Image (cartoon, rainbow, N blue to C red):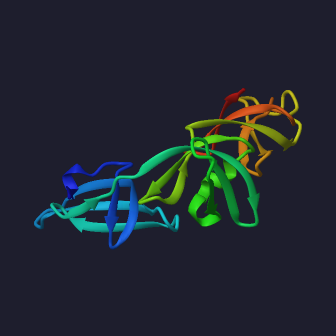
Amino acid sequence: MISTGDLKKGVTIEFEGQLCSILEWQHVKIGRGGAIVRLKLRNLRTGSTVDRTCDAGDKFKRVYLDRSSVTFQYQEGDQYHFMDTSTYEDIVLTEAQLGDAKNYLIDNLELDIIRYNEEPISVDLPEKLVLRVTYTEPGYKGDTATGGNKPATTETGLVVQVPLFISTDDLIRVNTTTNTYVERA
């Protein structure tokens, strides 16, 4: 069991019978009452995010997840197929299980799959990925005085704000946690 004092971002707990990962937490001391803890949780099975409040000192069951290396193979409808690199097993995840990670899946991408009791739950992306820009408007020199941004569509369909000097077919590095442009690759 884990107490509210031990909670932190990224810890996986069982909350109201569901597997949840803590996205944010905040310890709040109320004037006359006792302290409370505000939690922002992501359900690992459905991908939904919920905000909950609990009393300080409450206890939760800590959940330990297994990780293994996989390679993205292909998409078929709303199902995404991965191959375990050690056992060559075909693992299928749905669009709901992947959440925003589906915007970064390119062929033969190596990443980690997260499992609970041998059940695949979701994937863990690298912090930064290189994607090819498939379409963006041309940027003209002198458009702005301090630089500017424009939308660019990547090979996976993700739209990212990029600087004006980025053009179609450029490779860019994107931060997968914030969905933002980092640099030209």
Answer left or right for 184 relative to 6. right
Q: Quadrant of the C terminus?
A: top right
* Residue 123 picture location, percent across and down: 55, 51
Task: Choose between 111 and 100: the one closer to the eye.
Answer: 111
Q: Quadrant of residue 150?
A: top right
* Residue 148 picture location, percent across and down: 73, 35
Return the residue found at the far left: 32
Q: Quadrant of the N terminus?
A: bottom left
Answer left or right for 58 relative to 168. left
Task: Choose between 126 and 23: the one closer to the eye.
Answer: 126
Answer left or right for 157 relative to 69. right
Q: Quadrant of residue 85?
A: top right
Task: Choose between 3 and 79: the one closer to the eye.
Answer: 79
Numbered disc total: 0
Is 130 rendered above or below residue 17?
Answer: above
At 18% from the left and 64% from the top, the residue drawn is 58
At 43% from the left and 67% from the top, the residue drawn is 50
At 64% from the left and 63% from the top, the residue drawn is 95
* Residue 84 picture location, percent across and down: 60, 47
* Residue 81 picture location, percent across and down: 68, 56
At 73% from the left and 30% from the top, the residue drawn is 147
Return the residue found at the far bottom: 16
